[in-house]
Image (tube, rainbow, N blue to C red):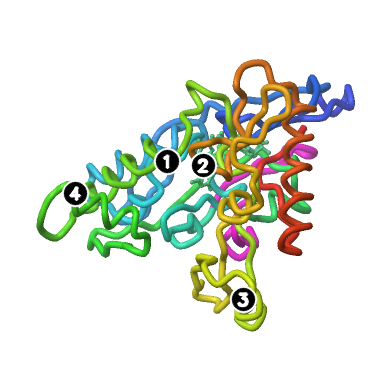
Amino acid sequence: MLAFAREEKLRILVLGGGSNIVFTKNFDGLVLMLDFRGVQVDGQKVTVGAGENWHWLVRHTLQRGLFGLENLSLIPGLAGAAPIQNIGAYGQELDQVFVELEATDLSTGEEINFTSSDCCFGYRHSIFKDELKDRMAITHITLRLCSDFTPILNYQDVVNELESLGEGIPTATDISDAVIAVRKRKLPNPDKQGNVGSFFKNPEMQSQKLEKFKQRWPDVPSRQLQSGVHKIPAAWLIEKAGMKGMSIGDAAVSTLHALVIVNRGNASSGDVLGLGARVEKQVLAEFGIRLEIEPVFY
Ligand SMILES: Cc1cc2nc3c(=O)[nH]c(=O)nc-3n(C[C@H](O)[C@H](O)[C@H](O)COP(=O)(O)OP(=O)(O)OC[C@H]3O[C@@H](n4cnc5c(N)ncnc54)[C@H](O)[C@@H]3O)c2cc1C
C-alpha cells in the first residue's frame, strides 16, 4: 500500500476517529485507517494498538487495577492519535504516563520507535503536529500506569461532581465517572452536533504578563503549570469578547462551551474557518492575545 502511494506520488492521511480534523475540501490522496488492536500488559506497562478506542482503553485499564488515565476519560478518538497532540484534560496529560510508541515511516516503510523525548511533547503538541506531520503512522503506544492510585483533583468541577456523588475518598473509577459526568454536561456531544472539541488552545502567560493583564481584567481565571507559566481559559476570553453563540452560516460558537465551534446542520468548512477567524480577530482586538487553533485542517 505504501509502495503504491509512493509510486503514484499520493499524499497519505492517517485517519483515527476523525474527532480532531476539519476537512476544508475533499482529500486528494490515500486515507489510511489503522486496525492495530489489542492490549498487552506487562506489570504496569501497557502497550495498545493504535486502532483501539481511547475511552475504552481508559476504562479497561481501570478494570485491571492500573491507574493514571482516569482524568482523560471520554476524550473521543483512537489510542494511536493520543500522542499527536499529547491529549490532556482535567490536570493530566498523556506525556505523564507515556513511555514510547512504534510508528511506520510513510515514505520508507521503516519501523521506528519514539521515546517521550523524541516526541517533543508540549501543551497539545508533539513532533507529529510539527516537523513529522503526516510522515508517520503510529501503530502502537506504550504507557506506564500505576497500581497505586494517586488522585489528581486540580479541577473544581470534578471535585464538585465527586462531592455530589457521595462521601468518602474517591476511587480512580469515581474520578473517571465524575469526569464523564462533567464532560457530558459541559461539552456538546459530537454525535449529536458536529464539533472537534476545543477549537483554540488556552493561551499561556508568564507571571509578569498575567499580573499586568489582571490590572485590566481582575476576574480572569488562571492556572499555574508546573513550568511556572499560567494558562488562561480561551473560553473566558471568547465569552468576554461577546462571541458566545455567534454564528456564520450553520457554524456557531457553542452556547454550552465557548471554546467549541459546532455545526448546527449544514456548516461549510468556509463557515467554520470564517467563524474561527472572526473569534481570533475579536479576541486579539479586545485583549491583545492571539489565539492558536488546536485541531488539524486538511
Ligand atoms: C467533543 C470533543 C472533546 C474533546 N476533548 C478533548 C480533550 O479534553 N483533550 C484533548 O486533548 N483533546 C480533545 N479532543 C480532541 C480529540 O479527541 C483528540 O485530539 C483525539 O486524540 C483525536 O483522536 P482521533 O482518533 O479522532 O484522531 P483524528 O481526528 O482522526 O486525527 C487527528 C490527527 O492525528 C493524526 N493521526 C490520527 N491517528 C494517527 C496515527 N495512528 N498515526 C499517525 N497520525 C495519526 C491524523 O492524521 C490527524 O492529523 C476532543 C474532541 C471532541 C470532538
193 is higher (above) or lower (below) than 132: above
Residue 73, given in percent of the width and then of the height, sits at 37, 43
Structural distance between the alpha carbons of marks 4 and 2: 22 Å
Crowding at mark 3 (Cα within 10 Å: few <14, some 14-19, many 20+): some
Mark found first going from the N terminus, 1 or 4: 4
Residue 31, given in percent of the width and then of the height, sits at 71, 23
Mark found first going from the N terminus, 3 or 1: 1
Location of the N terminus (image quadrant)? top right
Name the residue carrying label 4. Answer: 164
Q: Mark 4–mark 2 contact, CB under 8 Å?
A: no
Structural distance between the alpha carbons of marks 2 and 3: 23 Å
Residue 19, given in percent of the width and then of the height, sits at 57, 32
Name the residue carrying label 2. Answer: 257
Which residue sits furthest top?
266
Name the residue carrying label 1. Answer: 186
The amino acid type of the residue labelled 3 equals Leu
Structural distance between the alpha carbons of marks 4 and 3: 33 Å
Residue 93 vs residue 85: left or right? left
Q: Secondary structure at mark 3?
A: helix
Residue 114 vs residue 255: left or right? right
Mark found first going from the N terminus, 4 or 2: 4
- Residue at image location 51% in from the left, 59% down from the top: 95
The amino acid type of the residue labelled 4 equals Ser
Closer to the camera in the image, 1 or 288: 288
Crowding at mark 2 (Cα within 10 Å: few <14, some 14-19, many 20+): many
Crowding at mark 4 (Cα within 10 Å: few <14, some 14-19, many 20+): few
Residue 297, given in percent of the width and then of the height, sits at 74, 36
Residue 268 appearing in the image: yes
Residue 114 vs residue 269: left or right? left
Name the residue carrying label 3. Answer: 210
The boundaries of the magenta stretch are 101-124
Mark found first going from the N terminus, 2 or 3: 3
